Image: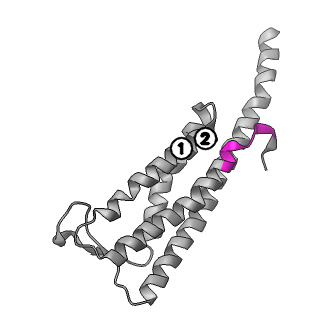
């Protein structure tokens, strides 16, 4: 009988954890869509001013330069957010203060991500600044939205 009662006590926390996971997944998806739209809007404005966006490999040579086509920021952001969503779920599951751990980790990762455009070979200053702006814009959208979802106590899920 005690195992049945123990299982009944565990059930509400399991349901709450699922609700929280759903909220974290939803926050990641919504933030990704908004950040991708913002990054694409930024690059569209830069292109409209006549700047040709092309980027080389970090530390590479002039042969590595490729154009930054329409949709490139969205595709890259979607790929990175697969890892970011995984990070948020792991932090949600194992960290004592998931919002704080996520915030600190993603700010560090954002800072490190700026090294790629800064060190890109044969890349114009305008392209580097645009890519840095796109990184910071995406981070400014994603990090607070996901951190907020991680910081909600289980009983306050939307």
The secondary structure that most of the magenta stretch takes on is helix
What secondary structure is found at the residue carrying circle 1?
helix
User: Would you name the residue on which mark 1 appears?
Assistant: 104
The image's colouring method is one colour
| Residue placed most toward the observer, 71 or 39 | 39
Quadrant of the rendered image containing residue 156: top right
Q: Is residue 100 left or right of residue 42?
A: right
What secondary structure is found at the residue carrying circle 2?
helix
Disc 2 crowd rating (10 Å Cα; few below 14, some 14-19, many 20+) is: some
Residue 39 circle label: none
Q: Which percent across, then down, holds residue 11?
A: 77, 28
Task: Kindly report the distance in space between the C-alpha atoms of the residues bearing marks 1 and 2.
Answer: 6 Å
Q: Is residue 93 left or right of residue 109?
A: right
Q: Is residue 32 left or right of residue 124?
A: right
Residue 68 visible to the viewer: no
Residue numbers of the magenta segment: 148-155
Image point (53%, 44%), residue name: 104
Examine the rendered structure and indicate whether residue 121 appears above or below residue 69. Answer: above
- Tag 1–tag 2 contact (CB < 8 Å): yes
Q: Which percent across, then down, holds residue 141?
A: 59, 61
| Residue placed most toward the observer, 155 or 1 | 155
Image point (34%, 64%), residue name: 117
Q: Is residue 153 magenta?
A: yes
Image point (80%, 22%), residue name: 9
Image point (50%, 55%), residue name: 81
User: Would you name the residue on which mark 2 appears?
Assistant: 100
Q: Quadrant of the N terminus?
A: top right
Q: Which percent across, then down, holds residue 121?
A: 23, 67
């Amino acid at each position: 009988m005690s195992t049945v009662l123990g299982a009944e006590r565990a059930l509400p926390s399991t349901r709450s954890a699922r609700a929280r996971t759903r909220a974290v997944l939803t926050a990641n998806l919504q933030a990704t869509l908004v950040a991708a739209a913002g990054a694409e809007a930024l690059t569209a404005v830069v292109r409209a001013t006549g700047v040709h966006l092309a980027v080389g490999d970090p530390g590479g040579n002039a042969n590595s330069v490729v154009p930054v086509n329409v949709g490139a920021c969205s595709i890259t952001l979607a790929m990175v957010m697969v890892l970011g969503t995984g990070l948020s779920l792991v932090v949600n599951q194992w960290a004592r203060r998931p919002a704080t751990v996520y915030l600190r980790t993603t700010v560090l990762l954002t800072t490190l991500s700026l090294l790629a455009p800064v060190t890109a070979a044969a890349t114009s200053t305008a392209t580097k600044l645009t890519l840095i702006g796109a990184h910071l814009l995406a981070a400014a959208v994603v990090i607070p939205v996901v951190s907020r979802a991680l910081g909600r106590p289980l009983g306050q899920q939307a």
